[in-house]
């Protein structure tokens, strides 16, 4: 799949069965974007947040019911302390600056992962944002914070066991994404082609779309291209 997109292609209409309801994105390439420009990594992350803002807007404009973004994994704590500090500062700024826009655009914020392990002030800000957007229904934005899919599966299996028999249905009912549509399409930027412990269960029958574009350069037009390529695929879910 090419990263170059000249213009947004024609869109398929929501409700035809060819439009994905739920798209997830592994946002990769902030550091490489900065390195190519001989800038600090922090500048790559800052530009990446600007891309998050534009893609969240695009998701609503393109008719997506749900958009999930892999923002901070449970493995990201291994990064240098100053980089983690920069990321947390950007998170604070994003919540403060964008919560009013979420409310105005009918976006419901959802957090997946153990976000309560973050700094107390961030937890308080997220709790407030979750409450303020809880009644919104146009688009659900799920942000993965301190998230790891293997941990999610362990927690879901433990909850299912406490409730009774462990089945595929009871595990799924206890996933962080239980109240969201099934995952249709998973996108990863920057040329990497792996899941990196993201939505392992949810991606069982999702379509994958990879692009060489670094996350800070990802656009609405390229998202539309991914949706249109999805529309042309035949999904058999194990059948013939």
Image: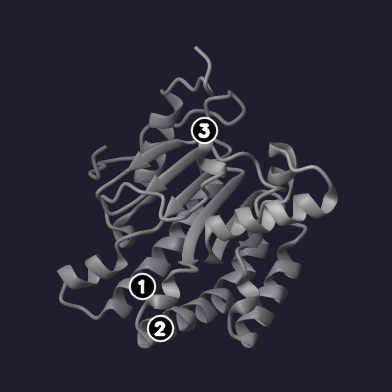
Q: Which residue is mark 1?
A: 45
Question: Element at badge 2?
Answer: helix
Tell me the quadrant of the picture where the N terminus can be found.
Answer: top left
Closer to the camera in the image, 195 or 219: 195
The local secondary structure at tag 3 comes to: helix
Above or below: residue 235 compared with residue 185: above
Nearer-the-camera pick, 192 or 181: 192
Above or below, comparing residue 46 to residue 168 in the picture: below
Q: Position of residue 53 (x, y in %)?
A: 47, 63
Sequence-first tag of 3 and 2: 2
Tell us which disc is closer to us: 3 or 2: 3
Q: Give the residue displayed 52% in from the left and 37% down from the top.
A: 204
Q: Is residue 94 left or right of residue 34?
A: right
Q: Earlier in the sequence, mark 1 or mark 3?
A: 1
Residue sitting at the far right:
163
Across and down, in percent, residue 47 comes to: 34, 70
User: Disc 2 marks which residue?
Assistant: 86
Give the residue at mark 3: 205
At a point 62% along the width and 69% down the height, the residue shown is 114
Tell me where residue 52 sits by quadrant. bottom left
Q: CA distance from mark 2 to mark 1?
A: 8 Å
Question: Do the residues under discs 2 and 1 have CB atoms within 8 angstroms?
Answer: yes
Tell me the quarter of the picture where residue 234 sits.
top left
Q: Position of residue 181 (x, y in %)?
A: 65, 41
Crowding around mark 1 (Cα neighbors within 10 Å: few <14, some 14 to 19, many 20+) is: many
Please count the marks in the image.
Answer: 3
Alpha carbon of mark 3 to alpha carbon of mark 2: how far? Answer: 35 Å
Residue at screen point 49% across, 28% down:
12
Q: Position of residue 192 (x, y in %)?
A: 29, 51
| In this picture, residue 211 sits left or right of residue 50 | left
């Amino acid at each position: 799949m090419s990263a170059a997109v000249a213009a947004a292609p024609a869109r398929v209409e929501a409700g035809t069965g060819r439009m994905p309801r739920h798209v997830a994105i592994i946002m990769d390439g902030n550091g490489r974007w900065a390195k190519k420009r001989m800038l600090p990594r922090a500048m790559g992350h800052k530009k990446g947040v600007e891309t998050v803002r534009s893609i969240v807007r695009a998701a609503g404009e393109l008719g997506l019911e749900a958009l999930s973004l892999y923002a901070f994994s449970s493995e990201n704590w291994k990064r240098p302390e100053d980089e983690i500090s920069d990321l947390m500062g950007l998170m604070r700024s994003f919540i403060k600056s964008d919560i009013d826009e979420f409310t105005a655009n009918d976006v419901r914020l959802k957090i997946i992962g153990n976000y309560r392990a973050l700094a107390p002030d961030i937890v308080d800000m997220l709790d407030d944002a979750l409450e303020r957007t809880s009644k919104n229904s146009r688009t659900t934005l799920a942000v993965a914070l301190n998230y790891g899919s293997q941990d999610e599966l362990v927690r879901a299996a433990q909850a299912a066991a406490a409730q009774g028999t462990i089945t595929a249905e009871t595990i799924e009912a206890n996933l962080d994404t239980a109240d969201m549509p099934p995952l249709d399409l998973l996108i990863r930027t920057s040329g990497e082609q792996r899941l990196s412990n993201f939505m392992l269960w949810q991606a069982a029958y999702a379509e994958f779309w990879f692009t060489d574009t670094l996350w800070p350069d990802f656009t609405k037009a390229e998202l539309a291209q991914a949706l249109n390529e999805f529309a042309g695929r035949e999904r058999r879910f194990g059948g013939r």
